[in-house]
Image (cartoon, helix red, strand yellow):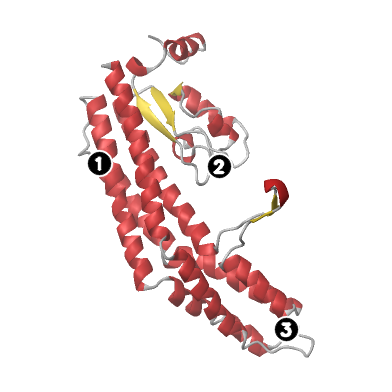
Amino acid sequence: MAGEKQSNLKKTAASIEGVVDSATLKLLEGAQKTQTTTFRGVLVLIKKLDLNPTGTIKQTAKNMKVLNEIRRVVENLVINKAYEKRVGSFVGEFEAIEKLNKNYYTTLAAAFNPSKAVFKQILKNQQQLTINSLLESGINANIVEPIKNIIQQNVTAGGNFDDLVTQLREEIKGVEAVTGKLGKISKTGKLGSLERYSGQIATDSLNQYSANYGQAVTADLGLEWVWYSGGKKRTSRSYCKKRAGKYFHVKEMEDSASLSWSGKIPGTDASNIFTKRGGYNCQHLYVGTDTEVVPKKVIDRNVANGNYTP
C-alpha cells in the first residue's frame, strides 16, 4: 500500500508539471509574432515625435501627447482575438489540475470530500485572478506601462531617437543571447515583454492553484507530511535544490519560511510558504501525504525535534 501511495504521489506531481508546461507553451503560441507587431506599431507612433536636427527628442507638448496614445495602440495589438482565445483555453487547464489533485487525494484518504465548497471557491478565485492578470489590468501594468515609461523618460530628458528605438526593441522583442568563443556567453538573452510576463503568470497561476488546493486538503484531512516535488534544474533556487524530492513534516516546511535565499518572494512566511514556495516562477510543489510513505529517517528526525509524536 505504501508503495502504491508513493507511486500515485509522484505520478500526480509529474502529471501536474506536464499540464503546466503544455498549457504555458500553448498560451505563448504567437507571442513572438505579437511582440514584433507591437514593436512595429509603437515604432509608427514614436515617428510622430518632433526631433532636433541632431536626432534628439524635443521637450514639447506635442511629444507628450504621443504618450497618451500608447495604451490604446499596445492594448489593441496585444489583446487581440487570438490572444483572448488562448487565454480562455489556458484558464480551462485549471480543471485538468483539479482533476489530477482530486484523483490523488481520493486514493490517499477515504475521508477526502472533493465536493466541499472551499475547493470550488479556490478554483473560481484562481481562474478570475488569472484572467485579470492576462488581460487588460495585467497587460497595462506589466507591458504598456514599461513601454510608456521608456518613451516618457526619453522625451523628458531629450534622449536620442535611435537610442529610444533600441530600448523599445529590447523591451518589447527581447534580446537574443550571443555565445562567444569556447561556448562562453558574451551577451545575456532576454525574452520579449509578452513572453516574460504571460509565461510567468501561466506557470505561477497553475502551480499556485495546485498549491492552494493542496494546502486546503492537507489542512482539511489533518495531514502532517509533505513531499517537495520537482527536479533540480540549473535555474533552481537554493531553497528548492536542498528540498526537491524530499519529505518534510508540515512544521519543518513552515519553519523554512524564515530562511533567506535568492529569489524569495517578499512577505513569505509560515502561513503562505505552501503556496509561495521557492519564489516567482517556482515549478516545485509541496504535496500532502501520510506517514505510511515517509522514510523512517525523516520520521525519526521529526520525533527528535518534537514535531511529530507517533
- Residue 89 x %, y %: 30, 59
Q: Nearer the viewer, residue 176 or 53?
A: 176
Q: Which residue is located at x 34 percent, y 62 percent?
A: 86
Q: Which residue is mark 3?
A: 57
Q: Which residue is mark 1?
A: 99
In the rendered image, which quarter is residue 145 located in? bottom right
The furthest residue to the front: 182
- Residue 63 x %, y %: 65, 86
In the rendered image, which quarter is residue 70 located in? bottom right
Q: Which residue is mark 2?
A: 267
Q: Choose the circle earlier in sequence order: 1 or 3.
A: 3
- Residue 248 x %, y %: 46, 22
Residue 78's tag is none
- Residue 226 x %, y %: 40, 26
Work out how far the residue at label 2 is from the one at label 3, CA to CA, in angstroms.
Answer: 41 Å
In the image, 305: left or right of 65? left
Q: Secondary structure at mark 3?
A: loop
